[in-house]
Image: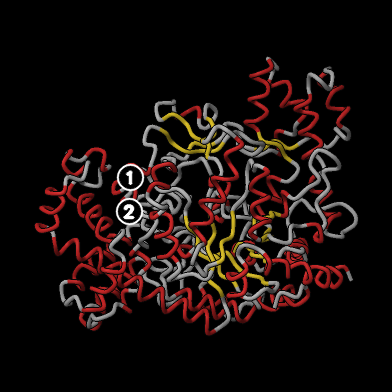
Amino acid sequence: MLVRQLISYSSEIYKKFLNSKLSSQWQKIGIKRRAGVLAPLFCLWSQDSVGIGEIPDICVLIEWCKKVGFSIIQLLPLNDTGFNFTPYDCQTTFGIDPMYLSLEKIDGVDISDFINDIEKLRIQYSFPKKNIDYKIKQEKLKILWKMFQTTKLNIQFEDFEEKNRFWLKDYALFKVLKEKYQQKSWEEWEEKYKFREQGALEEIYNKEKDLVNFYMWLQWQIFLQMKVVKEYGEINGVLLLGDLPFLVSRDSADVWAHQNYFKLNMVSGAPPDMYFAKGQRWGMPPYNWKVIEENNFDYIKQKVKYAENFYHMYRIDHFVGLFRLWTIDINEPKETYGLNGKFDPADEKKWKALGQKILFYMTDGINMLPCAEDLGVVPKCSYETLEEFSIPGIDVQRWKRDWGKTYDFVKPQDYRVNSISTISTHDMSPFILWWSEEAGTTDKYLVQKWCEENGFNYDFIANNLFAVSKSSEKRLRWKKRIETPEKVLEILNMSRDKAWMFYDAYLESYSEREKFWKFLGFIGEPPEAPTKELIYQALLMCSATSSIFCIQLIQDLLSLGNYYNIKDKNIRINVPGTFSDKNWSTVLPVSLDEMLNASINNEIKEINNKTDRI
């Protein structure tokens, strides 16, 4: 009964989107409750894939979405990462990574001449496997170079080059120079290239014209394959939600070509919060908005305009960065992470005007609807702007709680209407790992930090408050016998004023599982290991929210089946603030072809039907 009342109530509220600053974008996609899937392309594979998920594989995912009632596919950034393979630290915010190209669908090439080479690669880098072997990129580039040498650049390519003159040639020159200098940063190149002396750039272009054209040709081929996918989505009623990284790698074509648009004496990051006690240091350079504005925000407008070729909607990563960005001096020791940073601009009174000005240029004349990643430390002006523009933010189920009061989980009808509800993001543990390892625990480093700052004995606190044997490497689980926060104070023999951090941590986390179990409508004691019933109900409650969109991580959806073991940490996509070859490399245990007939399809469709998202 709750779900039906909720839907009737919410459908009226969605109409206000038509009176917002983005009414035309909403009219373009239609105002309705939608459900979707977040599926990183590198995670996917089909019987046709060669070593990694490829652009045409998205068409198979579209077919699966039709079967289960999804009308949104959210992708992580597809931008060219070079050989770094970190999608939010890319070498360009325009060009897409050629490793996603289907070798069998290259336009203007007689594929029969290369079919043996392609088949060898398919066997060498075969599926299933747990992690992507990114050496596939270099192998595919070798074949693509051979293909390129058999082609003649036609008028369609020349038209593509002309329409993308803002970025394309600079990107191609950057790639050529990266090869010349064995992938070293542009800051280590000879000064004539580092500082873009016109004569030097003309010289390298004339000398390496074939290679420059090759990199531009790759982007043209990507353009053609991505356009097919977008059109296929439109035919089948599935919208593509792209991800535009807000920041770009310091060692990128963007920064090299527009050095005055960035503050190269600083790096970006995030301040300390309850999840990252040291804050974060990302390393990408902050924008120099003053100079960008002097150039009429051309850089911002052009990259959104180019992305519109491929997507119906786009996610603004780190949306709060439009208003202010946490910046750290480049000479600050890396081990301090984001502890010693500051907001830019420093004056909070300037934040809203700056963010809304940037947003105007990102949306003016663009049909794509923006969505916002607004997690972390969020200023008031961000919520106000999302409301004024009717931009969906992100509401994460496990973080939607009555913080500082009851700590209960927020009811579905109390989610923001202009939001995307989800049970996990790509930067979090998937639901089954959260439930088995994190729910009901507190951050180990945070406890160590509190002890260090206040002169407490960590070993005493850890052994008396926490069940160390039931804790993980990074999380501490409370002892069951500590049934009240007052018991924490009694064990520590401290006042609440002195031990407030442990008192509050207890309130936040001790009964987290029990509260979530009750929130889902279950009675009795919650299980220690996630059950199918638990996962289904979590997905159902998330879909029942008043959020206009509900998009679930593909790993969470597959958890409805017998695809994952809770002891397998490999299913997590990324652990922020860590550098590991396990990040951005996990592969689904099942092919897209098999997913078309998976037993979980009926359950997913049932959830979407029950919550009026079909």
Count of picture labels? 2
Residue at the image point whose x is 20% and y is 78% from the top? 154
Q: Position of residue 170 (x, y in %)?
A: 26, 55
Q: Which circle, 1 or 2, is nearer the viewer?
A: 1
Circle 2: element type: loop
- Three-letter code for the amino acid on which mark 2 is drawn: Gly
Residue, x 87% and y 27% (percent of image)?
Answer: 487
Q: CA distance from mark 1 to mark 2?
A: 10 Å
Does residue 445 appear anywhere in the picture?
yes
Instruction: From this view, report whether residue 493 is shown above or below residue 446.
Output: above
Residue 177: percent from left, percent from top: 20, 50
Q: Is residue 407 left or right of residue 434?
A: right
- Mark 2 — residue? 82
Q: On the image, which quarter does residue 607 sit in?
A: bottom right
Q: Amino acid at mark 1?
A: Asp
Q: CB of mark 1 within 8 Å of CB of mark 2?
A: yes
Per the image, the residue denoted by label 1 is 251
How far across and how far down the image is residue 503, in percent?
A: 80, 29
| Residue 473 visible within the image | no
Quarter of the image for residue 609 reads: bottom right
Task: Give the secondary structure at mark 1.
Answer: loop
Query: Mark 1 or mark 2, which has the lower sequence index?
Result: 2
Q: Position of residue 374 (x, y in %)?
A: 62, 50
Dot 1 alpha-carbon crowd within 10 angstroms: few under 14, some 14 to 19, many 20 or more: many
Above or below, comparing residue 569 to residue 37 in the picture = above
Q: Which mark is residue 4?
A: none
The quarter in which the C terminus is drawn is: bottom right
